[in-house]
Image (cartoon, coloured by chain):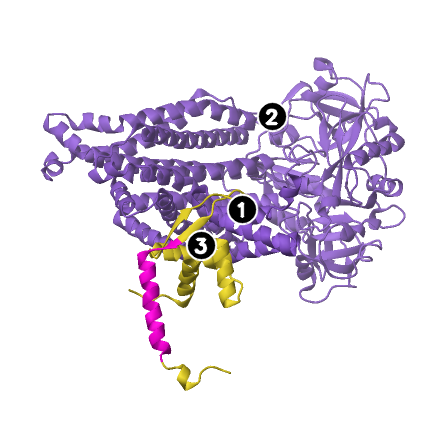
Amino acid sequence: MKLLKKRNPPFIAQFLLKKFFPDKGSYTTLGDLQESFSHIAKTAGLFEAKWWYRKQTVQSIVPLIKYSIYWGMNMFLNYLKMGARNILNDKSYSAINLTGLVIGITTFILISFYVYSEFTFNDFHTKGDRIYRVNKVFTPLAGNKEKHPLTSGKMAGAMAANYPEIEKTVRMVNDYSELLIRKNQTIFELENVLLTEPTFFEIFDFRLLKGNKSSALVEPMSIVLSEDAAYKLFGINDPTGETLIGLNGNKFTVTGIIENVPDNTHITYDVLLSWSSTVPAVGQMSRKWLNNWLTQALHTYLLVKPNTDIQNLEESLQQIITEHLPLKKDQYHLYLQPLNDIYLGSSDLLYNRKNKAGNEDYVRIFLIAGLMILGIASFNFVNLTGARSLRRAKEVGVRKTLGASKKQIVKQFLSETFLVTSVASLIAALFAALLLPYFNQLTNKNYEIDYIDLVLFLFLISVCMSLISGSYPALLLSNIKLTKTLRGQLVLNKSRAVVRKLTVGFQFAISMILIASAIVVYSQLEFILNKNAGFEKDRVVVMPIGKTEISNKAKVFKNELLSNPNIISGAVTSPVPGLGTFSQGISPEGKPEGEDWIASAFRIDDYDLPDTYEMEIVSGRYFSEEFATDTTNGIVINETLAENLGWGNDAVGKKFDVSGEVENGVVIGVIKDFSMTSLHHPVEPLFIYYQPRAQNLSLKVRPENIASTMEFIKKTWEKHDPAYPFEYVFLDETFERLYASEQKMMNIFSLFAGFAIFVSCLGLLGLITYSSQVRKKEIGIRKLLGSSSYSIVFLLSREFLVIVFISVLFSLPVTYLLMSNWLQNFAYRITLDIWLFVLAGLISAGLALITLCYQSFRAATANPVNSLSTE
Amino acid sequence: MKLLSRQEEMLLLAVWRLQHQAYGVLIRDKLKEITGKEWAYGAIFTMLDRLVIKEMLTSYLADPTPERGGRSKRIYRLTIDGKKALVEIKQIEKALWEGIDELGLESK
């Protein structure tokens, strides 16, 4: 048996031949081939025989394929011709179909831009799969675990020295103080300074356009300018080797030019400054906190060797903490975040503000929503073609009589669908190209079209869409009984009605979900923007004065401004409420030495914070001029901190030291909680203390004559510091920017919801038009027998109304789940009231109703004479 | 009726010669014997099919044999039309060759 098996022809060749010569199962041809095969095997050997067999296979199949393509093309062209005739034949039907498809595909193309760019973020680094950022999980003494992307300055060195798996490390931090350069009596501001090391160029693929990669960032005070920064300072001249003089006398040497920061990286910079400049006793910009073990203030990235076991490395990295920060070993837990995960996977990280971040959930939601709209458009196609099959049935009958096989009918309808979808895709591409600028505005991005990719993409969409939306009508029509079609006895059967009900139901359920979601997102945003964050943010002008001459004479400046009656009050503070904080270690009364307590620090330089921001003191008192000691040891804490420390209402009078800042501090009052960050996060524990030279001046202004007030402020500013340009922001505007990604989501969602309901209604319009055409005579007879127009409207739309109603009901729980999930992102959120859903349901059902009534009313009011007189 | 092509003529003759043994393998062998060339099965079957469609050949299935992997032979037979076509082509050829030898075409 075994011997015989070996003498069999090659399996694959035989298989192919079987495919091509079905021969009703007897395969006589194969028999001939096999006979020759065994003959050759006997005379020339098995190997020869096998080769011969294969050769025969190829020789037989190639011409076959050639012919099938030739005839296939012929038929295909015929199908396309018929398709085109059919499209032109019934213009309203084609218009409905095309509009739906165009909207669906346009949306999908635009969404794909967004999704693609989000998923390929950061992917231009050639070693990207080996780059990791060192993050840590931080467990505070009170409160929830937090994730931070921050590390301390000494860690990188210890990691590089002790772990053979780590090839290179790089530290970087976006320096908070901007770089001010004095050149020819003008002051230039280099906004985004990235302190980093020479390995920056070895690990990442940012292009250095001028200068030497290995030496550009070695010397202290070396600076690498981005193209824009170089142009701003030197025009088109080559700046390398030039010296820049800072406002405070620091001298920087320009050692190179780096490309402008690409759109698709989370790292941002205007200029790079060598890390060595910050090392105490080495560079002039000594920053102790960037070069010690304790302060967690910078980002460390690792380049690991190929095939490193990351989990192992992560575990062993913890050794660094136990060795060098033994006090924190239970609080800090290091882990590695892959570079490719940083952009989308960092929404749960705190202190990631300077980096660009996306939100993976949103990307998913958009992708799904885009697909849904595409689905709605496909279903329109399915339904309308199904409804029209009555008319097409005769054509199918004739084709079948002339010898078309079922397969050919399927092919015909698929090619027709392909024609429609590819026309729709082309129009959609045109629309997408036209709409791209607006879409960019809506999403705050900068997408460009790659036309080659787009064409491929469109082809793919067309093929997929025609398979999805074409197969049902194709199968339906190819299965029609020949005799029935030709005798014209075709009736809409039950199974088709079920499919139609399901698809219409699905369309409205999706529309409903999108509409309800848009409403929820909108109300949540309104809620957050209007929620009292614990302070009043309207009509507050904030000016950063930290770097100006004004910071030395802030009080004089402020008093001069207050002479204007339109300026109500002003407060000099270090962070600004609502715009982020920094943490500091504290030692409150009654807590043991070893325990590390951390809270947000808020520094003031005058007594007017509560007035300007309309904050409330809960117990005790605020800082006051009457108590001279307030400036040295007065502390005001917020309610959350009082609660975290377990002091409750007895906080006033407790001792409270701030490490390195306030000794023998005493709590003089408790202030009502106010939010220091966006309302995604709950209020953090916070304390306020007095420290001169604060960074920002906030002014509360009157709503009248804002323009002249601002002009007055500007003049006063220029009087006190003519060199530094006048800068200000309105706090409420800055605040809105904190919710930019939600705003974006809402914009896109409303658009989607609009499209979805529009396309669904289009489909409904098409369906009701057809059903009223089909039932034309019935309607005529009914009217003749005395039925009113309204009862006919009801008759026609009843079926659809029930479907719409059911689908709206069905989508309620889905929307509820989705949205309550989304709301988890916020510490402060709206409750999902029933009215939100009722509103969404009313909108979608209402639009459906209008569509239905419009068309059915037309059918119902038509004169029965016209419909009955024919024949 | 349209004239037979040269290949069709050869095939029909091979089938006629083989009488009740005219199936794929032997037809191919016979053609090889006559023309001295290897014929691909693909080419032979395409033509056989075409001749069947033109109703110059009919075919029937014979018993399977083990060396064929248990598959039947498809045996071809000439139809009346096939025979007529052969006769016709023979007459034409005869007319074509009439007297050519006397002109000394033969390369001796």
Q: Which chain is purple?
A: A
Chain label for disc 2 = A
Q: What stretch is highlighted in magenta?
A: B77-98
Q: Give yes or no for residue A792 being in the magenta stretch.
A: no
Q: Mark 1: which secondary structure?
A: helix
Chain label for disc 1 = B
Residue A102 locus on image (x, y percent): 40, 46
B58 vs A814, left or right, is: left
Quarter of the image where the N terminus of chain A is located: top right
State the mark number for residue B22. 3
| Mark 1 and mark 3 residues within 8 Å of each other at the beta carbon | no
Q: Mark 2: which secondary structure?
A: loop
Main secondary structure of the magenta stretch:
helix
Mark 1 or 2, which is nearer the eye? 1
Amino acid of disc 1:
Arg
B31 vs A620, left or right, is: left
Residue A740 locus on image (x, y percent): 56, 39
State the mark number for residue B68. 1
Q: Give yes or no for residue B93 being in the magenta stretch.
A: yes
State the mark number for residue A827. 2
- Residue A154, by quadrant, is top right
Q: Is residue A539 visible?
A: no
